[in-house]
Image: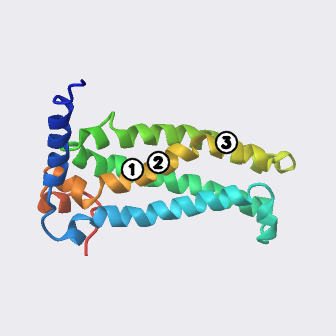
Amino acid sequence: MTDTSNSTPATSAHTAAETAFKFKGDFRAWNAMSSHMRGFHNYFKYEFDNVYKQADGGFKEEGHSLPQFLREAGSLSQSLINHHALEENYIFPALAKKMPEQFGPHGLEKEQHKHIHDGLESYEGYIHYARSHPEQYDGKKLRAIMDKFRDVLYAHLDDEVRDLGAEALQKAGFTLDELRRVPLWPRF
C-alpha cells in the first residue's frame, strides 16, 4: 500500500494558494505596460520573421535590392537594442525593487537580454560584412545566425509581456500609484 498522505495536502495547498489570488482594480490601468509592450513585441516578431523569410532572396520578390534589404535587417537590430536600453535604464530598475527574479541585475529579463544581444552582435556583424561585400552575401548564413537566438528572443518577448501583466504586478505588491511613477509607464 502506498502512502500518499504527504503529497495530497501539499498539492491541495499549492492549488488553493494559486486560486486564492483575486485581481482587484482597473485591469486596463494595471495592464497598461503589458499591453503597450505587446504591441512593440509583436512588431519585433513580425520584423524578425520578415527578415528571415526574405533573407534567402525573398527580398527580390518584394522588389528590394540587397542594400535595401540589409538596411531593413539592420534597423531590426537597432530597434531591439534601443528598446532594451530603455527598459534596462528606466523600467527594470523600478520594477526590480519588488520583482528581482524578473527585472533585477540577474533576473530573467536581463539574462534574456544578454543572450539576445550576443545573437544580435553576430547578426549585426554579418549585416555589416554583407554591406561591405555584397557579392559574398549568403542568406542561408544570415538565417543560421538568426536561428541561434530566435528561441530566446521569442521566449523573452512573451515572458516580458507576462511579467508586466496586471496580475503579476499586483501579486508582486505594487500599487497603481507606484506603477504610474515608473518612467515611461503608459498614460491613458
Q: In this view, does 121 lie to the left or right of 96?
A: right
Q: Is residue 113 left or right of residue 72?
A: left
User: Residue visible at 73% across and 63% down?
Assistant: 68
Q: Distance between the residues labelled 1 and 2?
A: 6 Å
Residue 187 screen position, x and y as percent: 25, 71
Estimate how packed mark 3 is, as few (under 14), some (14 to 19) or many (20 or more) residues with alpha carbons within 10 Å: some
The reply to whether the C-beta atoms of the residues labelled 1 and 3 are less than 8 Å apart is no
The residue at which mark 1 appears reads as 159
Query: In the drawing, what numbered circle is on residue 155?
Result: 2
* Rendered-image quadrant of the C terminus: bottom left
Going by the numbered disc 2, the residue's amino acid type is Ala
Q: State the residue lying farthest toward the right.
A: 135
Residue 15 screen position, x and y as percent: 20, 46
**Label 2 or label 3, whichever comes before in sequence order:** 3
The reply to whether the C-beta atoms of the residues labelled 1 and 2 are less than 8 Å apart is yes
Q: What element carries label 3?
A: helix
Residue 62 screen position, x and y as percent: 76, 71
Estimate how packed mark 2 is, as few (under 14), some (14 to 19) or many (20 or more) residues with alpha carbons within 10 Å: few
Q: Residue 106 appears in which quarter of the rendering?
A: top left
